[in-house]
């Protein structure tokens, strides 16, 4: 898939905030952190539960179900019970809109 999908206007997402968008049936959480945008699949790799509502401290996101921790910037798993990294998606800003795309099939 080469198309970019609009998520939200840039000014609608506050620092430390997030929004969940649908990307061809995949829930993707887009976070604003340090003025940059990061997008991850909204599914913990431990059990598939949503993760966007977890606690965000710095760039570490903690799953609200079982406490697995991940680096939001890279998707890397930081602690069990998860052992697989989160899927990250490219993010860009175009014409004042946050956009994401699924580059896995390029």
Image: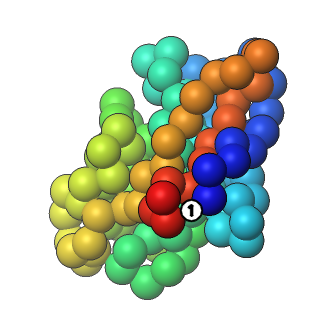
Q: Residue 54, percent across and down? A: 50, 55
**Residue 23 left/right relative to 43:** right
Residue 17 vs 15, above or below: the answer is below
Q: Residue at x 19, y 63 (%)?
A: 79
Q: Residue at x 39, y 49 (%)?
A: 61
**Residue 88 left/right relative to 24:** left
78 or 8: nearer the eye? 8
Q: In which image quadrant can residue 82 be found?
A: bottom left
Q: Residue 20, percent across and down? A: 70, 51
Q: In which image quadrant can residue 67 be found?
A: bottom left
Residue 13 visible somewhere in the drawing: no
What residue would you read off at disc 1? 42
4 or 97: nearer the eye? 4
Residue 87 vs 11, above or below: the answer is below
The mark tally for this picture is: 1
**Residue 88 left/right relative to 18:** left
Structure colour scheme: rainbow
Residue 73 visible somewhere in the drawing: yes
Task: Answer few, some or many: residues within 10 Å of disc 1's Cα (few below 14, many 20 plus, some between 14 and 19).
Answer: many
Which residue lies most toward the bottom here? 47
Residue 84 vs 41, above or below: the answer is below
7 or 105: nearer the eye? 105
């Amino acid at each position: 898939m080469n198309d970019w999908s609009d998520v939200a206007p840039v000014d609608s997402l506050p620092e430390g905030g997030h929004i969940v968008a649908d990307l061809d049936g995949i829930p993707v959480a887009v976070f604003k952190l340090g003025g940059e945008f990061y997008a991850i699949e909204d599914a913990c790799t431990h059990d598939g539960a949503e993760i966007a509502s977890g606690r965000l401290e710095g760039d570490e996101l903690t799953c609200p179900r079982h406490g697995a921790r991940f680096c939001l910037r890279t998707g890397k798993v930081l602690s069990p019970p998860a052992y697989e990294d989160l899927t990250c998606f490219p993010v860009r800003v175009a014409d004042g809109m946050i956009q994401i795309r699924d580059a896995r099939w390029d």
